[in-house]
Image (cartoon, helix red, strand yellow):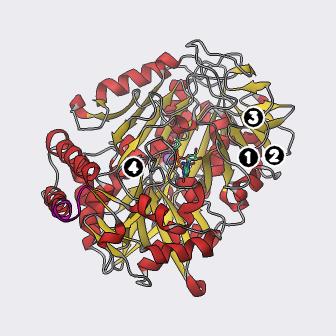
Amino acid sequence: MNALERLEKLLDREQFEKIRAIDNPKLHEFLAGWIEWLEPDRVFVCTDGEGDENYVRWKALYYGEEKPLETPNHTVHYDNYYDQARDKANTRILVPGGKEIPFLNTKDREEGLREIRELMKGIMKGKELFVCFFVLGPRNSVFTIPAVQLTDSAYVAHSEFILYRKGYEEFKRLGRNADFFRFVHSAGELDERKTSKNLDKRRIYIDLQEETVYSVNTQYGGNTIGLKKPAFRLTIAKAVREGWLSEHMFLMRVNGPNGRKTYFTGAYPSMCGKTSTAMISWENIVGDDLSFIVPFNGVARAANVEKGVFGIIQGVNPEDDPIIWKVLHSPVEIIFSNVLVKDGKPYWNDMGVEIPDEGENHSGKWWRGKRDAEGNEIPPSHKNARFTVSLEHFPNVDMEALEAPCGVELGGMIFGGRDRDTWPPVRESFDWKHGVITMGASLESETTAATLGREGVRQFNAMAILDFMSVHLGEYIENYLRFGEKLRKAPKIFAVNYFLRDEEGNWLNRKLDKGVWLKWMELRVHGDVDAIETPIGYIPKYEDLRRLFREVLNKEYTREDYEKQFTIRVPELLAKIERIERIYREQVKDVPGELFEVLEEERRRLLEARERYGDYISPFALEG
Ligand SMILES: Nc1nc2c(ncn2[C@@H]2O[C@H](COP(=O)(O)OP(=O)(O)OP(=O)(O)O)[C@@H](O)[C@H]2O)c(=O)[nH]1
Ligand SMILES: O=C([O-])CC(=O)C(=O)O
Ligand SMILES: [Mn+2]
């Protein structure tokens, strides 16, 4: 029996016809094999029709994976108390022989496939399997990658409808020429709260060879939403192979003088400010998490991989995030996850309004002071609680850029992380190579609640992408360096640090100060303002920032604040170079030699400056 004949036996007529309309034997083989193996009670195939999307929405409620909230079109979803973030330890890149690759968690491919298949055998008995088609990137564009998702979670399928462009018609159009990604997910056995139960058997395995990701016994979006972080492992490898960039970056438009539009991407590790930067209310968002960047006639052009936001809700408040706040309080389709619910209303930590003392949250029935099995007090919502919503609902979305088949021309790329004491709030690199190496490849950041495990630990996190890396870091950096050489005019590279603190641990900046840094970077892209040359790149002049603080935030920016924030901290910077060099020399090993040269030059500049000015160099000393 061929695959189509097997599918005819496995599916009811209506569903079968939907599959038969796609002329792709590879797809048929994949579907038949997995449906036989997973043994679902029924299968639903999603076309691009509104009715099918509605069916999935309804099933998320029907199966109890989501519950309706008071506001129409709002639902809440809970993940298991111990399934609230990405599980790095159980996420493996499958490679032949289980070859060790620095900073990657690998596993022997054969063994991994065998294990995951065993875990998934018959796992959908009694359940409904959803077969969904989407594309990464805008449809019908140079960026488009088709993908098929199998999942027994209506919540996962529902999330994907909010976050990605539909792809059924694209599969039909491409027929047997479709080169597509595959995702197989099962939430596994559920408990009475409809959350994954067998967390000890939680696995996320990435098969680069077949461009397939398997995910089992988990529901948390970062582990399960196939087109998000699972697909990211596949696109990183594809981009390195093909000479473009697939990055953990927001994409936004910064509005310059006289209606000038300049596009920026920004790579910060999870929970380090991508969404809150791209959402700055007077600028325009294109994407908040994942960007594809291609060289196009000598110009870097970028597109959002997604069309929605799976954003962190903690800290969203009416003053700092007026737009998100408004969207979260309007009757558009939103899935809230792992928040506190009381009388049909969602609440979250640091939302700037009073929160009830009891209700339901990610721990079940909740009251203030409740402790978990480890004795930790449970906050109203989880730190990594999120909202899922389509970008079309945001008044500040740049819809034209979001849908542009050739993407938008990139003016600048930004790197940043949680750094309490080393980098200034904003600076510009000397050139592409200097930026790629001393800003991107040298990025460090404190760990956050976006991954399971300890928080606040400073960790090497090159390009904010290390959690998702699927190739040797040396190859990845090599691709980055060569990418710049394909361009007539490379985007300017900047580094930001929103997380500087004083000795007492107080923040040196307010959350909205980033709006000023963005305007400064926009002016720099076009050569509209001068800057101060320092050993680590160019920093803003006080006068320019003072003017921008007034214009953008209507605030006085004092010389004292400027000096404190922009002091060049030589000992910390030297120690950092030391750490980064050691990592590349001892752990990564095979890296382009340029990396060490550029770091060495930076060290030399810092040492020379120290000779002249001492350990902590005021920006005023370097001016003029
Ligand atoms: N102190 C401080 N905190 C900030 C600032 N900007 C954002 N945050 C906080 O950092 C967290 C930021 O998260 P997001 O912007 O949602 O993170 P993201 O980079 O989009 O993360 P992922 O979606 O996990 O990839 C939130 O808890 C914010 O309150 C800032 O300028 N200063
Ligand atoms: O993938 C997720 O879970 C959410 C996210 O953006 C990240 O962690 O970077
Ligand atoms: Mn992310």
Q: How dense is the environment of label 1, judged by Cα within 10 Å: few (below 14), some, or many (20 and up)?
A: many
Q: Is residue 366 magenta?
A: no
Between 110 and 562, the one nearer to me in the picture:
562
Provide the residue designation for mark 2. Answer: 73
Q: Nearer the viewer, residue 290 or 319?
A: 319
Mark 3 or mark 2: name the one nearer the start of the chain.
3
Quarter residue 364 falls in: top right
Q: Secondary structure at mark 4?
A: helix
Q: Is residue 10 above or below residue 496?
A: above
Which secondary structure lies at badge 2? loop
Residue pictured at 46% horizontal, 30% vertical: 87
Which mark is in front, 3 or 2? Answer: 2
Vertical position of residue 559 compared to residue 163: above or below: below
Q: What residue did someone put label 4 on?
A: 464
Question: How far is disc 3 from disc 4 in space, using C-alphas?
Answer: 36 Å
Q: Residues within 10 Å of mark 4 (few under 14, many from 20)?
A: many
Residue depth check, mark 4 versus mark 1: number of the one nearer the observer? 4
Q: How many other residues sit within 10 Å of disc 3, few (<14), some (14-19) or many (≥20)? A: some
Nearer to us in this view, 189 or 400? 400
Magenta residues?
Answer: 608-615
> Does the Cβ of the disc 1 residue fall within 8 Å of ligand 1?
no
Identify residue for label 3. 59
Amino acid at dot 4: Ala
